[in-house]
Image (cartoon, rainbow, N blue to C red):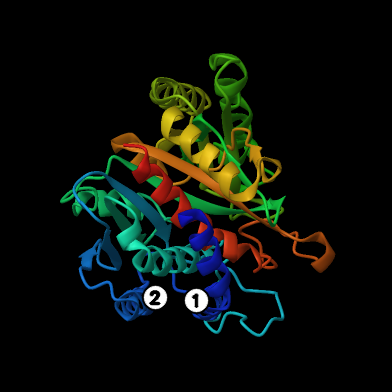
Amino acid sequence: MLKEKIKSLASAYKEEVIANRRHLHANPELSYKEFQTAKFVKEKLEQIGIQNLESKADTGWTALIEGRNPSKKIIALRADMDALPIVEANEVPYKSQNPGVMHACGHDAHTASLLGAAKILHEVRDQFEGTIKLLFQPGEEVAPGGASFMIRDGALENPRPSGIIGQHVMPYIPAGKVGFRQGIYMASADELYLTVKGKGGHGAMPETLIDPVLIASHLIVALQQVVSRAASPKIPSVLSFGRVEALGATNVIPNEVKIQGTFRTLNEDWRAAAHQKMQQIAHGLVEGMGGKLDFEIRKGYPFLQNDPELTARATDAAKEYLGEENVIDLDIWMAAEDFAYYSQEISGCFYRLGTRNEAKGIVSGVHTPTFDIEEDALEIGAGLMAWLAVSELQKA
């Protein structure tokens, strides 16, 4: 009966959840600058009747919804709140009013869904035992990740949850469906910053120069052997360079070339070994060609691992709520998520909410100017989060 009550409330609050999402979408804020977003979340939680808010990581919040026997078991639910530096191309009533900033990764939907789940859970709090801890976090998009600051500020303490559940939109899954994966799911992510230094000059006099453009060209190719030859084929790895800056001209060789890239993998031991291997190859090649190299590796999020037991229980609960045909198995995903920090501390389950609707043309991927969601999915976004939390509390 509690499941049906949650479904009924999710349906009743659907339009409110959509309205909250549209407000957030129209007023996006960049990572660690979510000041108005945090204010909005606080006001909405207080309107629900949730008063025990605690500020974390400057613009984040935690809050508690206590059922009967609140210390019996604690489970956490998490949403992220930051947007991206993207100019929105959608012409919709809720288009971003903050030029150059856009909710292009669905964090507006995550926050609205958790606010909806909070309203549902607060209303049915006398029908479950235990406590649900809400985490609204800043800065998921920018390393070192707002989750790390939430943990630093005690978001997982007083009380400490036994596990944490997070939801993320997925534009490749049709609205109405959700996806789960046990075990390793998402990759670590490190940023690479290289500066190849040579001796520039006239392009017609190469014998007098140390050409950093040529060196950089060899370097980009050579570093690929870290993935193709040094990595075990059993460990997925990605090494990509997305920015090369050589500010010369047709007949001008610059003094230096800057390169930026990303390295991602699903194994922490190999990750550390790969860092050393990249440094070794890069310095050896550049110095062997007469240049000098500055190579900075900014270590980002760890890989994300879903606790098999918690995720299995959540998957079963989702099948109860939506029907088995609407719950799919996910493959590994080489993108990164700072939810991984939580999953390194306590049992975690990070799942996907389908938001695709081809009939409406809602098909764009995340981090694109045309990204949007099928808003009907928000009824599931709020209701399923509430049901997963309650279902987990019932499994002591």
Quarter containing the C terminus:
top left
User: From this viewpoint, is residue 369 visible?
Assistant: yes
Which quadrant holds residue 318?
A: top right
How many numbered marks appear?
2
Residue at (57, 75) in percent of width and height: 18
Q: What element does badge 2 sit on?
A: helix
Badge 2 vs badge 1, beta-carbon distance below 8 Å: yes
**Image coordinates for residue 96, horizontal then vertical, percent:** 58, 79
Q: Is residue 57 left or right of residue 203?
A: left
Spot occupied by residue 276 in the image (x, y as percentages of width and height): 40, 23
Q: Is residue 5 rendered to the left or right of residue 361?
A: left
Identify the residue shown where x is 65% and y is 45%.
323
Q: Tell me if residue 300 can be seen.
A: no
Dot 2 corresponds to which residue?
Answer: 37
Taking the image as shown, residue 295 lies to the left or right of residue 219, namely: left
Numbered tag placed on residue 24 in the rendering: 1
Nearest to N terminus: mark 2 or mark 1:
1
Could you tell me how far apart the alpha carbons at marks 2 and 1 are, in whole angstroms?
7 Å
| Percent x, y of residue 342 | 34, 43
